[in-house]
């Protein structure tokens, strides 16, 4: 438990050290801020490896014998765009995705935009806030905002469970993902993880190698059950 406490202290200090850098970078544009998010994520992954002993490994979809990825061609778009729908168990998968998809943006709860300095960084990096407290979100407005960012070459990442979950926990997915996917005709790239086994929402961290699985694409018309099965396939 002491290791977990020490890591949390170091993580807090890491985020504090980034505050002046964020303030300097705010006028430099969204693309630069997204690169800074990726650099900050690399630091988080380094800290969790050095202090908590948690590494990670990425797994990609299986490859057929002729070297072609198992990915039905009728699910893809000519521009190669897709929505990344990821399992959410810890900060680790956020950091991994931010590092490996550096031109990404997230749909986040509005309260995160109120964090001093970091809220400005989220806004500058192109994060889209939603207000859960008032019930239904204006989904068409949200989809239009996503479409503009997709046109700019950005990649949308959604955690359809809406919050961090425990390994093996069944959580109902939010339907906003399906609305955006169908509205914009974007296929869905499911991403699973077992990071909660090592970096739980609460409690003691455990050393080991967390896994992140990129699954085969699903069509924009995929059902909630298909998406839930794909992102939860390896969640333990």
Image: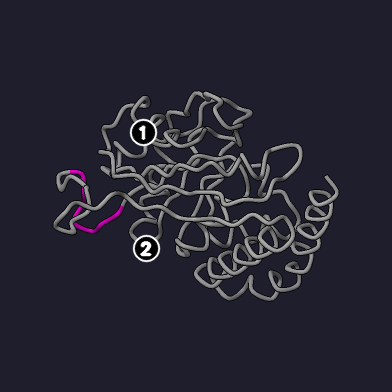
- Image mark for residue 179: 1
* Residue toward you, 28 or 103: 103
Q: x%, y% of residue 53? A: 68, 56
Q: Which residues are magenta?
A: 75-81
Q: x%, y% of residue 18? A: 73, 68
Residue in view at x 78 percent, y 69 percent = 17
Image quarter in which the N terminus is found: top right
Give SS at disc 2: loop
* Residue toward you, 193 or 227: 193
Q: Quadrant of residue 142?
A: top left
Q: x%, y% of residue 29? A: 54, 72
Residue in view at x 52 percent, y 59 percent = 98
- Image mark for residue 152: 2
Q: Horizontal placement of 44 versus 94: left or right? A: right
User: Crowding at label 1, few (<14), some or many (≥20) Cα neighbours within 10 Å?
Assistant: some
Question: Which colour assignment does the render follow?
Answer: one colour
Is 78 one of the magenta-colored residues? Answer: yes
- Image mark for residue 77: none
Q: x%, y% of residue 64? A: 19, 51
Q: Horizontal placement of 24 versus 168: left or right? A: right
The disc, 1 or 2, on the residue closer to the chain's N-terminal end is 2
* Residue toward you, 95 or 117: 95
Residue in view at x 76 percent, y 58 percent = 11
* Residue toward you, 210 or 216: 210
Q: Horizontal placement of 105 versus 74: left or right? A: right
Q: Relative to residue 202, is residue 70 depicted above or below?
A: below
Q: How many marks?
A: 2
């Amino acid at each position: 438990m002491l290791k977990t406490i020490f890591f949390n202290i170091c993580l807090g200090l890491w985020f504090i050290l980034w505050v002046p850098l964020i303030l300097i970078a705010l006028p430099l544009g969204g693309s630069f801020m997204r690169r800074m998010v990726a650099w900050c994520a690399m630091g988080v992954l380094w800290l969790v490896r050095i202090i908590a002993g948690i590494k990670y490994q990425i797994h990609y979809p299986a490859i057929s014998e002729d070297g072609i990825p198992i990915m039905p061609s009728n699910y893809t778009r000519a521009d190669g765009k897709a929505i990344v729908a990821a399992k959410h168990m810890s900060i680790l998968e956020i950091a991994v995705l931010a590092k490996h998809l550096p031109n990404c943006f997230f749909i986040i709860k509005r309260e995160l935009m109120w964090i001093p300095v970091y809220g400005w960084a989220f806004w500058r990096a192109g994060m889209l806030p939603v207000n859960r407290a008032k019930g239904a979100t204006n989904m068409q407005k949200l989809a239009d905002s996503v479409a503009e960012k997709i046109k700019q070459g950005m990649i949308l990442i959604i955690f359809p469970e809406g919050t961090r979950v425990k390994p093996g926990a069944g959580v109902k997915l939010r339907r906003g993902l399906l609305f955006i996917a169908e509205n914009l005709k974007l296929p869905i790239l499911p991403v699973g993880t077992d990071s909660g086994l090592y970096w739980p929402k609460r409690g003691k961290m455990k050393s080991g190698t967390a896994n992140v699985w990129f699954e085969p694409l699903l069509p924009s018309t995929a059902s909630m059950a298909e998406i839930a099965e794909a992102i939860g396939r390896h969640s333990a």
